[in-house]
Amino acid sequence: MKNYVYLFVFLLITACTSVKNDPNKEDWIQLFNGKDLTGWDIKIAGSALNENFNNTFRVKDGVLTASYDQYQKFNGEYGHIFYKDKFSYYKIRVQYRFVGQQTPGGAGWAFRNSGIMLHGQSAASMTKDQSFPTSIEFQLLGGSGEGERPTGNLCTPGTNVVMKDSLFTPHCINSSSKTFNGDQWVEAEAVVLGDSAITHLINGDTVLSYTKPQLDEREATYPEMFTHFGSKMLKEGSISLQGESHPVEFRKVELLNLKGCMDKKAVNYKSYFVESDNSQCKYSK
C-alpha cells in the first residue's frame, strides 16, 4: 500500500512540475485583481497624483470603472489610471464597455470614448493640469446607434508612428473594425513589440498595425520627454486606462510579457518570448 502512495505522490509532483515548467503555457498577468485598485496610480487633470477627484476611478461589482455620478458637470478632468510597472514587449488584453449617459459638459468627441495608453510617460511625470500622457493611444469607441464608428483606432498624444513606410503625423486614424453599439462587452488586444511594431485587435481580429512609435519633435515638451524616455524612439513605457467624461467599465485587464528568459535550459524559459532578458533566468538546483 505504501508503494502505491509513494507512486501517487511522485506522479503528482511530476505532473505539477511539468505544468509549471511548460514553455508553451502562456502566463498572463492579471493587472486588475477584480477587487480593488492595488497596483494602480491615478492622475486626473487638475488634481495631484493619486488624488481621485470625485471618486472617478473605482471598483464596483468586480469591475474597474471610470464613473461620473459624483460630477455635476465635467470641466476637463480627463483621467488616467496607470499600472505600476512599465513594459516593452507584451500583449495586453482588455474587456470593456460603455454604459449610461455622458456627463454634462463632456466634449462631443468624448461620447463613448476611452483608450488604452501604450508606451506612455509615467503618472508621476505628468504636470498637475496635463490632460493626456505622452503615449500611443489604442482608442476605444462605442457607437451612437447611427452610422459607423469603429473602435481600436490610433491616436498619438505627443507621438508619431510609421504607416506604409511613411511618418504618420495626423492625430488619429480609424481602424477597420466594425461599430459596437449599445452597452455590449468588447475585447481589445494590443501586441506591442518595443519600438518596432504595434498591432491592434478587436474581438480577435486584426484591425490596425503600424511601426516605429516615437516622440513628436514638433511638441514643445519634446526635449523633456526625450530625457524622460531616454530616446526619441518609444521602446517601453507605462500602460494606462482612460476616462474622458463617459462612464466606462473594464472587467478584465491582463498582460502577457513577451520579454524574458530565452535560455532553453532555464526552468522559466518560454517559447513565446520574442525579446531576450536572460537576467531573469532561473535554473533548477
Image (cartoon, rainbow, N blue to C red):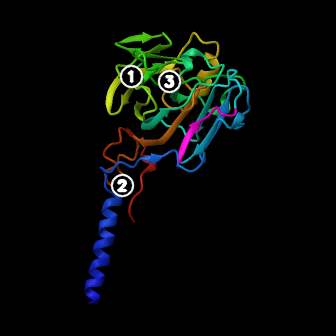
Do the CB atoms of the residues marked 2 and 3 lie less than 8 Å apart?
no
Spatial CA distance of label 2 from label 3 is 34 Å
Spatial CA distance of label 1 from label 3 is 22 Å
**Mark closer to the chain start, 1 or 2:** 1
Question: Is 73 contained in the magenta span?
Answer: no
Residue depicted at 49% across the width and 37% down the height: 87
Amino acid of disc 1: Thr
Residue depicted at 30% across the width and 46% down the height: 271
Q: Residue 30 location, x and y as percent?
A: 47, 47
Amino acid of disc 3: Ile
Amino acid of disc 2: Ala
Mark 1 lies on residue: 179
Q: Which residue is at the far bottom?
A: 1
- Residue 22, above or below 77: below
**Mark closer to the chain start, 1 or 3:** 3
Residue depicted at 28% across the width and 78% down the height: 8
Q: Nearer the viewer, mark 1 or mark 3?
A: 1
Which quadrant: the C terminus?
Answer: bottom left
Mark 3 lies on residue: 136
Q: Residues within 10 Å of mark 2 (few under 14, many from 20)?
A: some
Judging from the image, what secondary structure is the residue with disc 2 in? Answer: loop
Q: Which mark is residue 266?
A: 2
Region rendered in magenta = 62-70
Disc count in the image? 3
User: Position of 177 compared to 96: left or right?
Assistant: left
Q: Residues within 10 Å of mark 1 (few under 14, many from 20)?
A: some
Judging from the image, what secondary structure is the residue with disc 3 in? Answer: strand
- Residue 40, above or below 113: below
- Residue 253, above or below 219: below
